Image (tube, rainbow, N blue to C red):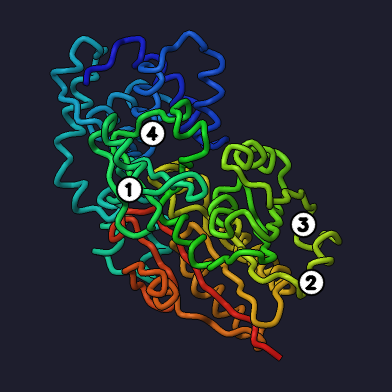
C-alpha cells in the first residue's frame, strides 16, 4: 500500500485536529469527511487507517517528534512506517526536505523503543503508572501491544432471524476470512473489516455489529422470556438488542439513558431487528423519578456503566490521551451512584449485572467489592459457572475479565449479583 499525495495531505489535516485531543478522534474524522464529500471510499479508508495508526503509535512518534500536532504530515509519515508497514523507499515521492532523515531516525530507535516501557507498550505515563500497581511489566506490554493493533469486525447473528452456521456459510461466499468467534455462540468475526451497512443481512436485521465481549455481557444477564428487564445505561442499544433476542421478543425491556441522541439510534435498530418489546426512555440522571415505578420489580438489571473506555483502545486509541487519573476518579464516583440506584430496581431473587469496558481495577473489581460491602442483601454469582451453564468454555474467575491480549476481544469486566430472597 502506497498512499497518494492527496491522501497524505488529508491525513495530515485530520491529524492536526486529532492530536489536540479536544474532541473524540472519530468525531473529528466524521466532521472532516462531511466537509470533504468528494473523497471516495478508498480515500476515506486510507486516511482513517493512517490517522488511527498515528494515535496507536503516538508514544514512538513523540519520542522523535515531540510536538506531532505541529508537524502532522511527519506524524502521518511516521504512522505509515510504524503502523501500516510502509518502507521509506515506498514513500520517496511524498517526502519533503528532512523527512527521509526523520524516518530513518525513527526506524533506528527500534531497540530503544523496545526497552522503554512507554514506547514498548504504547501507553502514556499516567496510564502506565496506574497499571504498574496491579500488573506485571510483561502483562502491561502484552496489553499495550494488543490494543495497538486494529480490531477485527465482530458481528452478532440475530437469533430471531437466523442461525449462526447458516449466516456464516452465506458470508464465507463473499468474505472467505469470515469465521465463528471462539466464545460467544452467536458471534462472527471478519478480519478484513468490510463495510456491511448496506449488506442485505445487515439491512434485514440478521446481523448487528457488536464486539464478542459485549455479546458475552448480554449472555451473563441470562434474560428469559416474559421478564421485566432494565438496561440502565442503554446508549445506542447494542446489548439491549442482544437481550431482546434472548427473550424471543417477549416481556418488557426498559432502555434508559441520559442521552436522547444515543437512544435515537436504538429505535431504527429495534425495527430492523424485529423487536417490539423495548421501551427506550431518556432519563435526567440515575435519580430520575420515572425510574421509581420499577423499584423492586425488575427480574434483571444491566448497568453498563459510564467508564474510561480503556478496554476499547483498539477502536478508540485517543482515549488513553483524553482520559487521566482525575477523570477516572470522577467516573468511579459516578459508577457507584448509578449502581446503587439500579440495585433498587431488582426484585428478590433477581439479577444485577455491573459491567464496564475498562481494564482498571478501581472501575471493576474494586467497584464490585464496594457494592457488596454496602449491600448485604446481594450476593456475588460466579461468572465462569454462569457461562458454563450456557456451554461457553471461558473461565476468568468469579468476575468476567476480558483482556485483548489474552482473549482477542475488547477489554470488558462484569460482576453479576443476585438479590437474596426474603
Q: Which mark is residue 52?
A: 4
The percent position of residue 96, horizontal first and vertical second, equals 26, 12
- Of the residues under marks 1 and 2, which one precedes in the sequence? 1
- Position of 28 with respect to 65 (left or right) is right
The percent position of residue 112, horizontal first and vertical second, equals 18, 47
3 or 1: mark nearer the eye = 1
Q: Secondary structure at mark 1?
A: helix
Mark 2 and mark 3 residues within 8 Å of each other at the beta carbon: no
Q: Quadrant of residue 383?
A: bottom left
- Of the residues under marks 4 and 3, which one precedes in the sequence? 4
Q: Residue at 30% x, 57% y: name it.
A: 182
Q: Residue at 56% x, 73% y: name it.
A: 367
2 or 3: mark nearer the eye = 2
As measured in the structure, the alpha-carbon distance from the residue carrying label 4 to the one carrying label 3 is 33 Å
* Residue nearest the viewer, comparing 293 with 71: 293
Residue linked to disc 2: 295
Mark 1 and mark 4 residues within 8 Å of each other at the beta carbon: no
Q: Residue at 70% x, 58% y: name it.
A: 252
| Residue 327 visible in the displayed image | no
- Position of 133 with respect to 328 (left or right) is left
| Residue 114 visible in the displayed image | yes
How dense is the environment of label 3, judged by Cα within 10 Å: few (below 14), some, or many (20 and up)? some
Residue linked to disc 1: 165
Residue linked to disc 3: 285
* Residue nearest the viewer, comparing 81 with 207: 207
4 or 3: mark nearer the eye = 3
As measured in the structure, the alpha-carbon distance from the residue carrying label 2 to the one carrying label 3 is 15 Å
Q: Which mark is residue 363?
A: none
Amino acid at each position: 500500500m502506497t498512499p497518494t499525495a492527496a491522501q497524505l495531505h488529508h491525513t495530515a489535516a485530520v491529524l492536526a485536529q486529532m492530536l489536540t485531543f479536544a474532541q473524540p478522534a472519530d468525531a473529528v474524522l466524521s466532521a472532516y469527511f462531511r466537509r470533504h464529500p468528494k473523497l471516495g471510499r478508498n480515500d476515506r479508508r486510507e486516511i482513517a487507517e493512517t490517522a488511527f495508526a498515528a494515535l496507536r503509535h503516538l508514544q514512538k512518534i513523540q519520542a522523535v517528534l515531540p510536538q506531532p500536532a505541529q508537524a502532522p504530515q511527519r506524524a502521518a509519515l511516521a504512522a505509515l512506517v510504524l503502523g501500516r508497514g510502509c518502507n521509506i523507499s515506498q514513500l520517496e515521492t511524498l517526502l519533503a526536505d528532512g523527512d527521509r532523515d526523520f524516518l530513518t531516525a525513527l526506524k533506528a530507535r527500534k531497540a530503544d523503543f523496545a526497552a522503554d516501557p512507554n514506547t514498548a507498550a504504547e501507553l502514556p505515563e499516567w496510564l502506565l503508572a496506574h497499571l504498574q500497581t496491579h500488573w506485571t511489566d510483561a502483562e502491561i506490554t502484552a496489553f499495550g501491544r494488543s490494543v495497538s493493533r486494529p480490531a477485527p469486525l465482530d458481528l452478532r447473528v440475530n437469533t430471531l432471524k437466523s442461525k449462526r452456521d447458516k449466516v456464516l456459510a452465506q458470508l464465507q461466499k463473499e468474505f472467505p476470512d469470515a469465521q465463528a468467534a471462539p466464545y460467544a455462540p452467536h458471534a462472527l468475526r471478519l478480519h478484513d473489516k468490510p463495510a456491511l451497512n448496506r449488506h442485505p443481512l445487515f439491512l434485514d436485521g440478521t446481523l448487528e455489529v457488536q464486539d464478542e465481549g459485549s455479546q458475552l455481557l448480554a449472555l451473563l444477564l441470562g434474560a428469559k422470556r416474559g421478564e421485566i428487564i432494565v438496561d440502565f445505561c442503554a446508549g445506542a442499544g447494542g446489548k439491549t438488542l442482544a437481550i431482546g433476542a434472548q427473550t424471543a421478543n417477549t416481556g418488557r425491556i426498559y432502555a434508559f439513558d441520559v442521552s436522547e441522541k444515543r437512544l435515537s439510534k436504538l429505535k431504527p435498530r429495534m425495527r430492523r431487528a424485529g423487536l417490539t418489546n423495548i421501551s427506550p426512555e431518556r432519563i435526567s440522571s440515575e435519580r430520575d423519578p420515572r425510574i421509581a415505578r420499577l423499584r423492586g420489580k425488575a427480574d434483571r438489571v444491566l448497568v453498563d456503566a459510564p467508564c474510561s473506555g480503556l478496554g476499547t483502545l483498539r477502536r478508540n486509541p485517543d482515549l488513553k490521551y483524553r482520559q487521566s487519573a482525575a477523570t477516572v476518579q470522577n467516573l468511579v464516583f459516578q459508577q457507584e451512584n448509578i449502581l446503587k440506584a439500579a440495585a433498587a430496581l431488582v426484585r428478590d431473587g433477581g439479577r444485577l449485572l455491573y459491567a464496564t469496558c475498562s481494564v482498571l481495577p478501581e472501575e471493576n473489581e474494586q467497584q464490585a467489592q464496594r457494592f457488596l460491602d454496602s449491600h448485604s442483601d446481594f450476593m456475588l454469582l460466579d461468572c465462569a459457572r454462569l457461562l458454563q451453564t450456557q456451554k461457553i468454555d471461558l473461565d476468568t474467575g468469579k468476575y468476567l475479565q476480558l483482556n485483548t491480549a489474552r482473549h482477542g476481544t475488547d477489554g470488558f469486566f462484569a460482576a453479576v449479583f443476585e438479590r437474596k430472597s426474603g
